[in-house]
Image (cartoon, grey):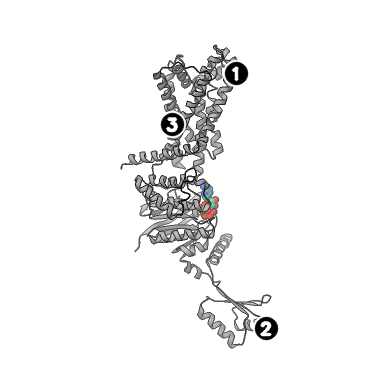
Amino acid sequence: MTNLAIAANGLRKSYGDKVVLDGIDLAVPEGTIFALLGPNGAGKTTTVQILSTLIPADGGSVRVAGHDLTGNPDDVRGAIGVTGQYSAVDKLLTGEENLLLMADLKHLSRADGKRRAAELLERFDLVEAARKPASTYSGGMQRRLDLAMTLVGDPRLIFLDEPTTGLDPRSRREMWRIVRELVAGGVTIFLTTQYLEEADQLADRIVLLDHGRLIAEGTAEELKRRIPGGHIELTFTDPHLLDAARGLLPAGVADPEALTLQVPSDGGVRSIRELLARLDQNDIDIDAMSVHTPDLDDVFLTLTGQQKEKEATR
Amino acid sequence: MTTLAFATRDSSTMVRRQLKRLIRYPAMTVQLIITPVIILLLFVFVLGGALGAGIGGGRAGYVNYIVPGILLMTAATAATGTAVMVATDMTEGIIARFRTMRISRASVLTGHVAGSVIQQLLSMTALILIALAIGFRPNANPLEWLATIGLLTLFALAISWLSVALGLKSPTPEAAGNAPMPLLLLPFLGSGFVPTDSMPTVLRWFAEYQPFTPIMETVRGLLLGTPIGHNGIIAIAWCAGIAAVSYLWAKSIFNKA
Ligand SMILES: Nc1ncnc2c1ncn2[C@@H]1O[C@H](COP(=O)(O)OP(=O)(O)OP(=O)(O)O)[C@@H](O)[C@H]1O
Ligand SMILES: [Mg+2]
């Protein structure tokens, strides 16, 4: 069995009457990327804050990096690195000074600290800006500096709270590359995001958090399979052909205005070939065809929607 | 290394952080001296003739009389800056980052306190130089100067911890800027600008027992040779007490948040 970097059971947190986390279980194996996906206000940041010892939970038991969160917070702190949702750099200091500050606080020797800072400036493309105050950095640069600061002490477990929110597509891809590199080096990543694509791209395992509850869990593929919604859309040139096709494929949903028929399908090559063969045999010509496989957006919207309905009926 | 050694190292790291910030942005320190200097000039040149006549000694005597009070006011103004700086710092993500690191918790506060003490001492030095330029004539010997510096440093330490606590307690940097305001009034409501025996009873009672009065009387005694009496001991006790209580208070707010 692989070791768990994070093992949480029944994690709870409320602010006054507002229940923010309503009994959450998490199991994050070492050396993997774990994505906590959820809309605004779902409780992602709260989860990260609890797991990273910033705020206490109201209930539940948690082990992080093998240490009990409430019993040994300092040992947990020694093992983790955190890049929060909001910039955590000292804006009055330069990029280099920020990194050296981290090196000092990680109790590296002066020489080691200098070497590590130089290395990270290079790796995060901040060499030119190294001597400028962080307040003059662009959003992307601050984000990179932020992550570089987190890496100074070579933590084995890294929390990234919405690491690419507000970044342009290029910077986002850059960030993804860095995250993959880290995991290749054996680091465990706990990531929160609102972007399904990001979870899809990076995560070994995804949990969906909504209103403080986990509403789904699995790999991206598993989650996509959980919802129907995959279909093939056929477009016809005249209504007779559409009618004929509808007779042949009773499961399809027709749109007479657009002359289209949506046929449920898993989107696999075999089923497409069979479908086309049947149409062919019946001399039904199609004008166009498109395959729609469900993406995480569908999963997300479907599942968070279901959750809302459930809550409404309760 | 032992825990204590780590704590010391973290504190000195945080002190360096704060000093770098102060050196990089000297305007933050310079602007703190402006108000006390204006008050000094205002009181000496506009009101000094009349007030000086009241206490005997005229304008020249009045410069000597108000320097101790203005010195404390200078320190308190600098402390306002500290409270704002601390409150601002707390809104920044960097503090959250520190909290997730295995470092001595109080070190963040120690950094601010050290920075604040240095700021206050610099401001007070500048004020003394300006006062000397407009006629301040202390008659202290080197030992008395040393004692003055010692007491003012202790006072600065107490005010620093107090303003750090106020900064932590304030919901916003704006609120933090107002929190230490009463400190700026204490020299007026004590023996800073006029002797307390010229005041109505209630005010006089307050003026004589509030912490700034014995400190001002001691500084006045050390620099100008007026009688000190028990004020020295009381001043030290006040400073030590305020420092200790504020330290505990600041630490508990910081650990709770
Ligand atoms: N200190 C607090 N006091 C009161 N309520 C809070 C506090 N912190 C968070 N909340 C509430 O808890 C809920 C979850 O917040 P959280 O920041 O964890 O969400 P999130 O998933 O990170 O959202 P986002 O995507 O916007 O960052 C929100 O409704 C928020 O209003
Ligand atoms: Mg958040």
Vertical relation: B138 (above or below) A53: above
In this figure, which residue is indicated by the disc labeled 3? B245
In this figure, which residue is indicated by the disc labeled 1? B47
Q: Disc 2 vs disc 1: Cβ atoms closer than 8 Å?
A: no
Q: CA distance from mark 2 to mark 3?
A: 89 Å
Residue B169 in sight in this render? no
The location of residue B53, given as percent across then percent down, is 58, 12
| Dot 2: element | helix
Vertical relation: A62 (above or below) B87: below
Residue B81 in sight in this render? yes
Instruction: Name the amino acid, label 1.
Output: Leu
Q: Residue furthest left?
A: B1
Compare marks 1 and 3 and give the one earlier in the sequence. Answer: 1
Instruction: Name the amino acid, label 2.
Output: His
* Category of crowding for the residue at label 1, using alpha-carbon neighbours closer than 10 angstroms: few (below 14), some (14–19), many (at least 20): few
The location of residue B131, given as percent across then percent down, is 51, 21
Respond yes or no on whether mark 1 lies under 8 Å from ligand 1. no
Instruction: Name the one closer to the observer, B229 or A106.
Output: A106
* Number of the label disc, if any, that sits on residue A240: 2
Q: Depth-wise, is mark 1 or mark 3 nearer the camera?
A: 1
Instruction: Name the amino acid, label 3.
Output: Val
